[in-house]
Image: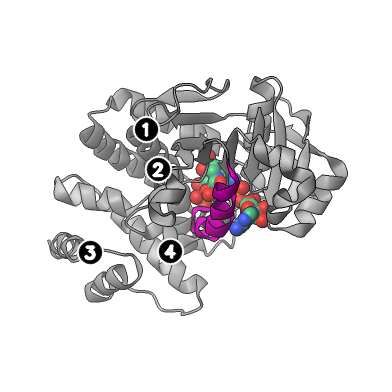
Amino acid sequence: MNIVHIGAGNIGKGFILPVLKDNNKNINFTFLDVNQQVIDDLKKTKMVSLTYLNKLKNVNKNYIIENALTLNEIFEPQNTNLLNNIDLITISIGKENLIKLKPWFEKLAEKLTKKIIVMCCENGNKVSSFFKDKVFEKETQKKFFFVDCVVDRIIPISKLKNAKSLNVEEYYSWIYDANQWPGDVPKLSGLKTSKNIDFEVSKKLYMLNSLHCSLAWYIYKNDKFKSISTIYNALQNSEVLLFTEKYLDECISILEHKFHADAKELKSYAISIIKRFMNKKVDDDLHRVARNTLSKLKTDDRISPMILYAIKYSLNCETIYMSFLNGINYYLSENETNVEIKDNNEILNFCSTNLNFSINEINALKKYIIN
Ligand SMILES: NC(=O)c1ccc[n+]([C@@H]2O[C@H](COP(=O)([O-])OP(=O)(O)OC[C@H]3O[C@@H](n4cnc5c(N)ncnc54)[C@H](O)[C@@H]3O)[C@@H](O)[C@H]2O)c1
Ligand SMILES: O=P(O)(O)OC[C@@H](O)[C@@H](O)[C@H](O)[C@H](O)CO
């Protein structure tokens, strides 16, 4: 099977490559990236070397890659065979960068003789559908099967000095939408399917990912990352643990209400998240988990939808709302404005100007703040 993966970064090298290679025979794997240095390094080594950060004993494993190319190199004559035989394109470049792939996909679409599956392995709400609907015209959309998925493995930023080595968490989960996968294409091993991808996406995004950035913003507010700089260090503090528990309890009530989900199952998922965050070997920097703060605060991402849902159905979201304000202030301080906003009108103004809140959403938030 020919896999082309766009984005030879942490999730590409530390998750997509090993999960596909470990679980499926005859995987021919090609990395594409815009970063010339990364591609040159991978061309040289043709290998990725992973260290699994097992709590008991680290395990090292090497993975062969068949090709590493810059995006446009794939259109060169010597790569025609590969181009004509792609089965699956996976992508992990950051949701905000997807728009840049528009011309590349349009060029590819002109050359295709069969429909190809595209999976955006980005954190966000059904990002493959977003990519399909918001980026492409109908004609291009028809050339691909866009399949939503949820990917989960914590891969901290590497402090190792070469592009081929990476430390990764041992745990992983990759779930895709069973309804969008074409019926005549065999399923991939190592991946799970779901007929309720909305729930799977929301569960991970609202609990794990929103807790991650909320912890960073909380620590920044109280410590400015002076004495605490990683997720593991943060969770050694009893006040942070209390914040975490309250935060996850509010998330659980919202998910339980929205999806009629089993609260016990969500509770054990919450416990599993805390356990994973408490793996001392996963040296996960707070700047990383808070990256792209503004996108994380927008109405299509991990915090605002929970607040707006809780307001609508009168559910408690006190801690999540506090975290939302921490996030706004973190964003402002990162952008060197040195202004904290606390005034209600400033908050509402920020939401409509920078976070895509609609008039109805602003009115709902206003009512919540005033009460
Ligand atoms: N690291 C994690 O723990 C983790 C886990 C699950 C999901 N994710 C998601 O995976 C995505 C990538 O995260 P990451 O940690 O691997 O980031 P990263 O910065 O390590 O890797 C991103 C890669 O994409 C490349 N890239 C950027 N723009 C590009 C473009 N226009 N065309 C081709 N390549 C381009 C970069 O050069 C880089 O190599 C994000 O959406 C993130 O939310 C990350
Ligand atoms: O990648 P982001 O910036 O969307 O979010 C930061 C982290 O929450 C994220 O990378 C997690 O480590 C990952 O999603 C775990 O599966």
The kind of residue tagged 2 is Lys
Label 4 to label 1: alpha-carbon separation: 25 Å
Mainly helix, strand or loop, the magenta region?
Answer: helix
Label 4 to label 2: alpha-carbon separation: 19 Å
Q: Return the disc, 2 or 3, that comes first in the chain's sequence.
A: 2
Q: Return the disc, 4 or 1, that comes first in the chain's sequence.
A: 1
Residue, disc 4: 294
Q: Return the disc, 4 or 2, that comes first in the chain's sequence.
A: 2
Residue, disc 1: 197
Residue, disc 2: 126
Q: Secondary structure at mark 3?
A: loop
The kind of residue tagged 1 is Ile
Q: Which stretch is magenta?
A: 94-112
Kindly give the residue lying farthest to the right in the view shown: 44
Label 2 to label 3: alpha-carbon separation: 21 Å
**Residue 86 vs residue 345: left or right?**
right
Label 1 to label 2: alpha-carbon separation: 8 Å
Image location (x, y in percent) of residue 286: 56, 54
Image quadrant where one finds the N terminus: top right
Q: Is residue 291 rendered magenta in the image?
A: no
In the figure, residue 90 lies in which quadrant? Answer: top right
Q: Return the disc, 4 or 3, that comes first in the chain's sequence.
A: 4
Q: Is residue 104 rendered magenta in the image?
A: yes
Residue, disc 3: 358
Q: Is mark 4 within 8 Å of ligand 2?
A: no
Task: Determine contact: label 1, label 2, CB under 8 Å.
Answer: yes
The kind of residue tagged 3 is Ser
**Relative to 282, residue 300 above or below:** below
The kind of residue tagged 4 is Leu
